[in-house]
Image (cartoon, rainbow, N blue to C red):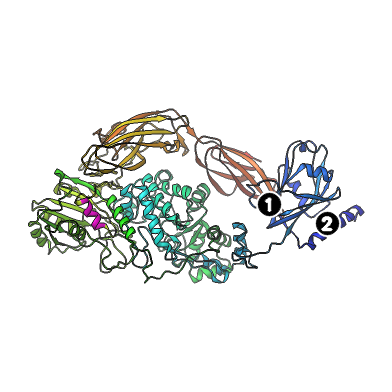
Amino acid sequence: MDMRITLRYLLLIGLILPLCAMAQQRSEILSVSASIKTEEASLAFDKDVKTKCTFSPQELKSEQWVMCTIGEPGDVSAITMEAQGVSKEELKSMLDLFVTYDPMNMGVPVDYTIEGDNKIFKLKLSPKYGAHIKFSFKAGKLNKPFSLKEVTVLLTPKELRNYKGEITKLRYMDPTLPVEDRVESLLAAMSSDDKMELIREGWGIPGILHLYVPPITKVEAVHGFSYGSGATIFPQALAMGATWDKELIENMAMAIGDETLVTGAKQAWSPVLDVAQDARWGRCEETFGEDPVLVSQIGGAWIKGYQSKGLFTTPKHFGGHGAPLGGRDSHDIGLSEREMREVHLVPFRHVIRTYDCQSLMMAYSDFMGVPVAKSKELLQKILRQEWGFNGFIVSDCGAIGNLTARKHYTAKDKIEAANQALAAGIATNCGDTYSDKEVIAAARDGRINMENLDNVCRSMLRVMFRNELFENNTSKPLDWNKIYPGWNSESHRELARKVARESIVMLENKSGLLPLSKDIHTIAVLGPGADNLQPGDYTPKLQPGQLKSVLAGIKDAVSKQTKVLYEQGCDFTTLDGTNIPKAVKIASQADVIIMVLGDCSTSEATGNVEKTSGENHDLATLILQGKQQELLEAVCATGKPVILVLQAGRPYNLSKASNLCKAILVNWLPGQEGGPATADILFGDYSPAGRLPMTFPRDVGQLPLYYNFKTSGRRYEYADMPYYPLYRFGYGLSYTSFEYSGLKIEEKKDGNVIIQATIKNAGQCAGDEVAQLYVTDMYASVKTRITELKDFTRIHLDPGQSKVVQFELAPYQLSLLNDQMDRVVEKGDFKVLVGGVSPDYLAQDRIKDSVGYSDTKKGVSGILNYVHEFSAYFGLSLFKVEENLLRSKKTVWVKVKNEGTIMDVGKIEMYVGGKRIGEDIHYELAPSEEKLIPFEVERNSADRIVFTTKYKALVI
């Protein structure tokens, strides 16, 4: 060996040995990247002093850098560097040193000192935790060649302590370490059985006792804590949508959160963000309605309130679940990508980007012909890559098993189904696939893809570490027989009554029959729902007397002199009409008749009932079930004034009822306080202000029927029926009247649009109004909907009082997907409408021209000639190339930057030697936002590498 090399080795050993005496450890170098000459830069870390990386004087005129990634993160305390062509003083003046855990955020340079001669240097620094070390050489500081021959990173071993301050050997138990470090440390300690146990569902995540992995107890909480018995039962979700009151629903969700906290549960498999487009579907009751903006805003308020208590939400069912074929649950209709992105993905995108949900439940349905349970396009590329979701995915119950011949035939057995679901990124399996003995055995012997299994475990462990569950986990097993403190408190009962009251929609009030006098002589209360309030699906086991029926509410509200008569008449579903004559006889004795008809939907703990609404209870018709319609018509035939209270989880066909009844209220599935809340409306203690969250059709033959449809290529009407609905979206009457005027529209320099309108209470009593903002894009490059809800607000007005409501729309809210599926805002005319209901129209040619308010007091409209244009433009550039020193691979980092003016999505693919390698990577970027995307290629490949997007290519 050359004497000079021998001396250098001795000098290097002389520097390292004292450091070892201080219990420092040499770190393995995983990869190297550099501003230039990455392959050559890696030679400085290859443990071979015969090789080197040299920077020329010309190269050093610009800033240059070299960055290495160490094998295991730790406290970097020293770096040895063998160099040529530079003195200790010159190195100090030219070198900025960075130590970081996050390579995208280098922070500020660390302070260091230099020891050693002019060939081998020792850089000493206060220990700093990191995984990446960047050597940044300042521009113009050295005017001669400079070489790095060998660089070694030394770590000071960290004394690991758990959250109690106790010394531990388990690296992942130290809360001071970064999340990713802890995740990888724990993952390395887990057996395949441990990993399968982690993703098994058992009333939540069971945890792994011997590894100290905490459990996460879950609950269904669509309209209250639904496990056990005794929690407050709030109105069902469709009623929440009917309130159009974001602040109220946020407060209600906070109350549900409080009732969750006391039980020790941590996660709610709620809310439902499906956009319900078919009233036959039994799960309409769990949704907030038919419009993506309404669902986004009310659902977002629910999430905001519940998560404010430190709890996890699990929005569901992702995605496209609300438009099933024929209204039959989970029978896919084949929605296009355009329809998904315009409607059904909108609420999920909104809450993931706005509220950082920690988990999400996938749907039984399909995405682009692929069951969601195996859709990498939806669950990986859109959810994670585009929207940045960083939580874990829960399967709907049985959805993974449905991949087998049980439903979808994409998997021959549970092992194949598990592999498909793991590849899509599903972590928690509600069902029996991940917990199947054969699947667990397959994980042991390699038939389960371990990389995919590790990735879903990572998604769950990140949530646990990020939320400090290893240090402070409040999850406890639920005592199903316990009524917990704070459940069904007086304040929560009053809140439930308020939500129910605000949700009630008055559809008819002929001759001002309502409100009734509390001194009326005789009231007949009839129907199967009159003394049998229906709270809806996902209701806990009922406590005796917890549900307050409409009959009970009426009895409590009227004077002592008022006689209240009651007869059920029929039940909800059977064809036994024996008692209809009894109901007719009682009706004939009354001054006014209140009939409570509709759905049967209640707690699963309630036996001997045939449900008509809720999960797996879809209808072929929308006629009131059983003998209810016959009962209604028989009672109306008495000639006495009839008030129909529709207690339902969906729109029904009320065509006959609208003619026969003097008044119609929809109180939905109103929760435990539904009876008193309904009485508040009936007797004028509260002016009805609920607005329809779903369209009510004239007939089931019109379905699917929703307000925001696209233009027809021919007729709209049927040969035997008009096109128009019976009651349109956003509709609802009041005991007072409101007038709209003074529409102002202003386009700002940044493209935002300010809309103002004045609303006046022109009636004689106080009341709430829901001001609804709609926009119609008059001419566009693609077909657009005849009108779309953009925003809304609920306000209170005293008699004679006026208020100005103001909305501000960003360009994104005026955007569309053009014929290339690019998101753009096109200049031109937009019709802007503000009113108390969705606008009416003439279902014929030139339909958009007719969109407006025939009664100009009910709403105002104007034309905005929009002059701005917005589009995205994605620039591609090479960011860096990393040489992996432990594998024959290199990582090419490509930077994508949105150099345009609006947020949009895109995807990038890699071709090596003309062949596509790997899968495309998606992104969604706001203007000026950039994303670094890594691609792995063979280290010694000489083939040309090309990266392509829709409109650009980058060749390296």
Q: Is label 2 in contact with label 1 (beta carbons under 8 Å)? A: no
Near-viewer residue (71 or 181): 181
| Residue drawn 47% across the image and 51% down it | 378
Q: In which quadrant of the rendered view does residue 722 lie?
A: top left
Judging from the image, what secondary structure is the residue with disc 2 in? helix
Q: Which residues are magenta?
A: 674-681
- Residue 191 has which mark? none
The answer to whether 334 appears left or right of 693 in the picture is right
Residue that sits furthest to the right in the current view: 3
Q: CA distance from mark 2 to mark 1?
A: 22 Å
The residue to which callout 2 is attached is 15
Of the 4 image quadrants, the one containing the C terminus is: top right
The answer to whether 445 appears left or right of 378 in the picture is right
Is residue 680 covered in magenta? Answer: yes
Near-viewer residue (351 or 947): 351
The answer to whether 795 appears left or right of 630 in the picture is right
User: Principal SS element in the magenta part?
Assistant: helix
Report how many numbered discs are placed on residues in the image.
Answer: 2
| Residue drawn 35% across the image and 33% down it | 756
Query: Is any atom of residue 222 visible in this view?
Result: yes
Q: Inspect the image, locate mark 1, and give the three-letter code of the amino acid beneath it.
A: His
Q: Position of residue 629 (x, y in %)?
A: 17, 55
Q: Residues within 10 Å of mark 1 (few under 14, many from 20)?
A: many
- Residue 132 has which mark? 1
Q: Position of residue 526 (x, y in %)?
A: 15, 59
Q: Position of residue 613 (x, y in %)?
A: 28, 58
